[in-house]
Every structure is written in C-alpha cells, then in structure tokens.
Amino acid sequence: MQNALLPNGKIINAKEYDQLIHGEKLFCVSCKKPVIYVGSDQGNREPFFKTTGRGESIHKEDCKERRTLIIFDSLKTINKYTTDMSKMDSEDKYLIKLDFAPDNKEQIPHGSIDEIDESHPKKKFTYAYKYSKKRSTLPKRITSLSQIARLLKNKPEDLSRITFTQQGELFSFTDIVIDQDKATEIALGNKYTNIDFIIYGVVRSVIKTEKVMFVNLDTQDGLKPFDIFVFAGDFKWFTLTKEQLEGKPILARGKIKFNERYNKAEMRVRFNKQIYVFT
Ligand SMILES: [Zn+2]
C-alpha cells in the first residue's frame, strides 16, 4: 500500500513517512489493522506499507486492500505447483492456443490462422488435447482477456498444467500471465519482442494529455513500476477513462519493452480489448 493511517487520523504516503516524525504506529487506511513500513532499499524500489500476516497485522475479510489482491491469489501461488512438464502425465497437461487479435487494427488477417507445423518438434504436445473430463470447461483457444480472467478462477494446480502456444512457441501459464517484476525482467532481456504478454496489476493513476494517456500500475509491496500508454491517434479505439481504471485490478495484453529513458518497462495499448478491468 502506498498510504497508511496515523494514530492522529491523518493519512501518510510511504514516500513522506519518517519514523522520527510520525512514529511507528501505522494502520491500514481501509480496515485500520496495523501495518508496517518497508523502506526503499537504497532506492531500488519505492517504499510501501504492508501487513505482516502475523498477529493483528492481517487485513479484515472485507478490506478493500485485501479484495483487490485476492483476484490474483491463484497467480501468486501457482509457482508452488509448477512441475516438470516432461514428467507429467499426458492426461494432466492442457494445451491452449493464444490467438489474440493483432495490436494493429489494420493488420487483422482474414481467414487463416497460423498453426504449428506437424513436423515442428514442439508439436509433441498434441496429445494434451485429450484432456480429462473434469477440465473440459477449459477452452482450447483463447482470443480475449475476459477468457483469461475466467481462467484465473481455476485452482492454481490446474493452472500450472496449462501450456500456452503462441507463434509456434510453448509457454507455461506463468511465462505469459505475469506481474510487473517479471515484465521488467523480460523487457530487459529483449528476447520476446513479438510475444503478447498479459500483465496483472492494480492501476495507481491515469494521466491523459492531448498526445498520450499513461496508465501507471501500482508499485505496492515493492513491485517495479510499469506503464501502459495509449497515443492520441488511438483514442478512438481506446475509450476507457480515468474513473473506470484508477484503483482497479486489471489485466493488460500486449508487447512489452524497456524504456531506457524512464528506466521502466512499458506496453503500448491501442484498443479497449487490450485491458480487462475487474469490477
Ligand atoms: Zn486493510
């Protein structure tokens, strides 16, 4: 959290917090449970407040801060279940083709969709289509972020069995559906410039000027900054507003790259369907 409540009822931002001036007693702005301050780690990240998860320092069930994060709970625990795909029973694997519309409206192809060539070594996952009955509700092809949002309701252990295919390459669920930290890592690696990633996070602020709109993700809990931007030329396709986005958990889909000038990873978005807002 960026803000905390002081015993005198004032709200303090983590960047302004000084233990000597404000003292050590800090509370969640929404549910009033105790939180602690986490410093900037020599400027490597933004300072923030958090619950410790021990004693009284746990958000109440209905706390806004907790509700916001609960959507992404399955994603946070999925890594615990990520197992060696090659050792997994074929019955337990599940292959989903990611088939989003191109970012460029003018380039939407008519008809044919690229398939992985039969002779391609990565075609070995074909048998994954023989999925067991209990997962028959999972789609074989995903074309929208709302389908991804629906997938997140599955148990983490089921999500860990999913393999995505995109442009003939195979990816695990957590290779594609990522947080800001992983996005930064991938952007710096500069390897997957043609792959669509799905970033999950909470919108901290939206700044719209005549030329560009910035959707900044929250750096709560020490996450690295991440910007989504829309150029004015795309405002006719992208109509989501500050009110619709600020404070909301979202999924954003697109190519990611590192912006050297601002020293953070970013994603260009061109139309509404590239952002899914959890309500
Ligand atoms: Zn709370």
Image (cartoon, rainbow, N blue to C red):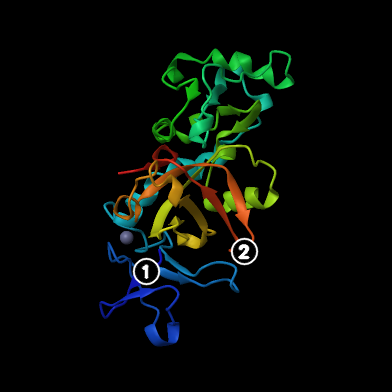
Question: Mark 1 against mark 2, which lies toward the viewer?
Answer: 2
Density class for disc 2 (Cα within 10 Å; few <14, some 14-19, many ≥20) is: few
Residue at the spot 39% in from the left edge and 50% down from the top edge: 69
Give x and y (percent) for residue 57. Answer: 37, 63
Residue type, mark 2 in image:
Arg
* Mark 1 or mark 2: whose residue is earlier in sequence: 1
Q: Residue at x 35, y 45 (%)?
A: 239
The one of 62 and 72 positioned closer to us in this rendering = 72
Question: In the image shown, does 89 or 228 lie closer to the viewer?
Answer: 228
**For this view, does 28 lie left or right of residue 124?**
left
Q: Quadrant of the N terminus?
A: bottom left
What residue do we see at 44% from left, 17% from top?
Answer: 136
Counting from the top left corner in percent of width and height, residue 213 is at 43, 55
- The residue tagged 2 is 261
Occupied quadrant, residue 144: top left
Q: Is residue 278 above or below residue 169?
A: below
The image quadrant in which ligand 1 is located? bottom left
* Secondary-structure class at tag 1: strand
Label 2's element?
loop
Mark 1 = which residue?
A: 3
Label 1 to label 2: alpha-carbon separation: 28 Å
Horizontal and vertical percent position of residue 35: 38, 67
Query: From the viewer's perspective, is 262 left or right of 31?
Result: right
Q: Is residue 23 above or below residue 46?
A: below
* Residue 150, placed above or below residue 239: above
Mark 2 Cβ inside 8 Å of ligand 1? no
What residue sits 33% from the left and 58% below the top? 59
Amino acid type of the residue tagged 1 in the rendering: Asn
Q: How many marks?
A: 2
How far from the left and from the top, in percent, is residue 52? Answer: 43, 62
